[in-house]
Image: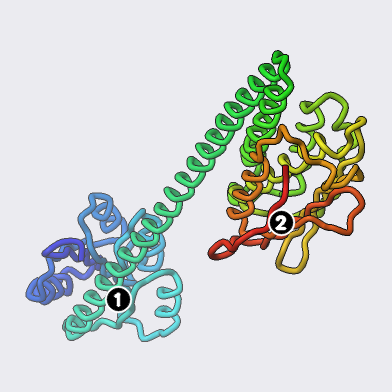
């Protein structure tokens, strides 16, 4: 019920019966308002404050069914109990189909009033339940809309963060590139170039996320293609001109994509420095899924690993590869049967539980 004392609008042209209804329903806790015609009842409803309607069928002007039709057009219309002296069940069916909450047959002596009380109580109770249900559903829809708006805002913010981080890292990589070009010391130039490649590997992930529809995964094959293109453009003149990629589509989370990119950068730069002492040669990167794992291979056709030792090496690349392999929970092995040098990195498609020990050999 909408108030402590609910108001019943009784629409009936029989004034004597209306007084009986008022007396009986007032004792039941209702305030009863009488309207002698359908139009009078509609005018009273327009004033508001009506919780339930009892509506007679036969009246001058609008009959009960016509009045019912007009009542149900009112926004938040109260429930209507249809009342008639007719025994014709077709009227009851028509009224209920039209939207009446209940139906009962009246008599001129007012013996139907206890039944009217029961019908009115039920109609008010059902209307309250329906209102509560509608309000709950509206709140659910509103909550969903708020969640969707927050999710959209979060996506925009994440995209903007990745855009800014990627740009900042690219600026750092460009500064390192400029510094490397201006250096006359080969060891400094090499160190700066390596650092630039590591920064660019991380920047590429953020650029991938900025343009991606899914912030939870990165297409590893596309990421490696962009990373190798960066290496071709930036590292050691024309020595990258024969860098190739053969990769199947593989999705992976951004954190592990960064680790993979850094490993590729280190092993490719290792091959650039040592595989071909007399010039440039082919360097191949291959990526392919294997059941629940992914295999990444970096290979060259150069002089071979045993001939690559360089006393100027700091071992930084080896330590970086080892650290990234731990992050991936990966196995990193050198293929002893390969002519030249070939490193194979194998890791799970999804994040594994505790990291296991790795075997790494790099510059």
Residue at the (17%, 68%) spot, across then down: 15
Q: Give the percent coordinates (x, y) of residue 99.
A: 41, 69
Quarter containing the C terminus: top right
SS at mark 1 in the image: strand
Inter-mark Cα distance, 2 to 1? 86 Å
Residue 116 in which image quadrant: bottom left
Q: Which residue is mark 1?
A: 83
Residue at the (23%, 83%) spot, across then down: 107
Q: Which residue is mark 2?
A: 332
Q: Is residue 8 visible?
A: yes
Q: Give the percent coordinates (x, y) of residue 244.
A: 87, 42
Query: Between 155 and 17, which is closer to the camera in this rendering?
Result: 155
Residue 39 in which image quadrant: bottom left
Residue at the (17%, 83%) spot, across then down: 114
Residue 278 in which image quadrant: top right
Tell me which colouring the rendered structure shows.
rainbow
Q: Is residue 323 above or below residue 22?
A: above
């Amino acid at each position: 019920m909408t108030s402590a004392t609910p108001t019943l609008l009784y629409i009936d042209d029989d004034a004597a019966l209306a007084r009986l209804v008022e007396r009986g329903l007032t004792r039941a806790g209702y305030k009863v308002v009488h309207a002698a015609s359908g139009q009078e009842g509609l005018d009273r409803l327009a004033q508001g404050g009506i919780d339930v309607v009892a509506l007679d069928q036969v009246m001058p002007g609008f009959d009960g069914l016509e009045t019912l039709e007009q009542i149900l057009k009112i926004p938040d219309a109260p429930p209507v109990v249809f009342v008639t002296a007719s025994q014709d069940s077709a009227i009851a069916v028509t009224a209920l189909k039209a939207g009446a909450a209940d139906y009962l047959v009246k008599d001129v002596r007012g013996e139907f009033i206890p039944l009217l009380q029961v019908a009115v109580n039920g109609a008010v109770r059902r209307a309250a339940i329906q209102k509560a249900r509608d309000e709950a559903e509206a709140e659910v829809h509103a909550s969903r809309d708020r969640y969707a708006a927050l999710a959209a805002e979060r996506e925009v913010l994440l995209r903007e963060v990745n855009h800014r981080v990627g740009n900042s890292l690219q600026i750092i990589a460009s500064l390192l590139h400029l510094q490397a070009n201006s250096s006359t010391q080969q060891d400094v130039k090499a160190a700066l170039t390596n650092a630039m490649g590591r920064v660019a590997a991380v920047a590429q992930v953020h650029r991938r996320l900025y343009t991606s529809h899914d912030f939870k995964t990165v297409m590893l094959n596309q990421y490696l293609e962009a990373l190798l293109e960066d290496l071709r453009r930036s590292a050691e003149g024309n020595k990258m001109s024969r860098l190739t990629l053969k990769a199947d589509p593989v999705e992976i989370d951004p954190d592990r994509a960064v680790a993979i990119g850094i490993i590729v950068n280190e092993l490719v730069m290792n091959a650039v420095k040592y595989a071909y002492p007399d010039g440039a040669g082919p360097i191949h990167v291959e990526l392919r899924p294997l059941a629940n794992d992914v295999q990444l291979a970096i290979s060259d056709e150069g002089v071979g690993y045993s001939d690559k030792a360089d006393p100027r090496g700091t071992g930084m690349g080896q330590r970086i590869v080892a650290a990234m392999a731990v992050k991936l929970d990966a196995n990193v092995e050198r293929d002893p049967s390969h002519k030249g040098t070939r490193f194979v990195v194998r890791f799970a498609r999804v994040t594994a539980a505790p990291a296991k020990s790795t075997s790494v050999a790099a510059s």
